[in-house]
Image: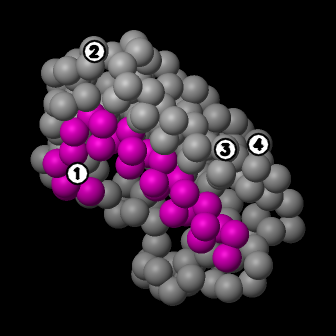
Amino acid sequence: MSERKRAIEAYLRQAHQATWPVLAAIPGEARERIVYSEGDGPWTVRDIVAHLADAEAGLLGQVQRLMAGKVTVPADFDLNRWNRSAVRRSHGRTFDELVGQIAVSHREAITTLETCDEAALDLQGRHSSGKVLTAEGFFRRMADHRQEHTRDIQRAISGAVSGKNGPG
């Protein structure tokens, strides 16, 4: 594995090691705490975990489509609408299933990185936010996104509700 791929893998693993103990140990009573209170309604800890489960699988799908020469997301993709509907769709899943999906997506991201060609890391595609990222940027965004939301969850559990407008 190249030095560049090892650095990206280390970044993904570091983010996982920093966030996994928090996400995997959220007590039942904390799951309904509000994380974001503005925007289109409150987002609870459970909602954010559902969002992370969906987002990590989605980001992985985007980078895999990019590497396959396909469109990453449609031009008219509405990230806010998607996020709201993904959380609604998660209501039939248990909290443990959602956390488990995060772990699966992490493992699949590592495998995708390990098996991709070095040149594929420079391919560019449209992220769901509308920004253009390289494949490396998609991998790094997975880690950053999870760390951002995990910090927000930690603040909510400790009693400080964020004034952010919701997940992104």
Marks 4, 3: nearer the viewer = 3
Q: Which structural element holds mark 3?
A: helix
- Is residue 136 covered in magenta? yes
CA distance for labels 1 and 3: 31 Å
CA distance for labels 4 and 2: 34 Å
Q: Which structural element holds mark 2?
A: loop
User: Where, by quadrant of the figure, is residue 4 drawn?
Assistant: top left
* Image vertical order of residue 28 relative to residue 99, above or below: below
Q: Which residues are magenta?
A: 129-155
- Amino acid type at circle 2 is Asp
Residue tagged 3: 17
* Residue 3: % across, % down: 38, 25
Residue tagged 2: 117
- For the point 19% across and 55% down, which residue is it? 130
CA distance for labels 4 and 1: 29 Å
- Amino acid type at circle 3 is Gln
- Res 96 label: 4
Marks 1, 2: nearer the viewer = 2
- Amino acid type at circle 4 is Asp
- Amino acid type at circle 1 is Phe
* Residue 135: % across, % down: 27, 34
Residue tagged 1: 77
* Residue 156: % across, % down: 69, 76
Asked whether, in this view, residue 122 is left or right of residue 165, the answer is left
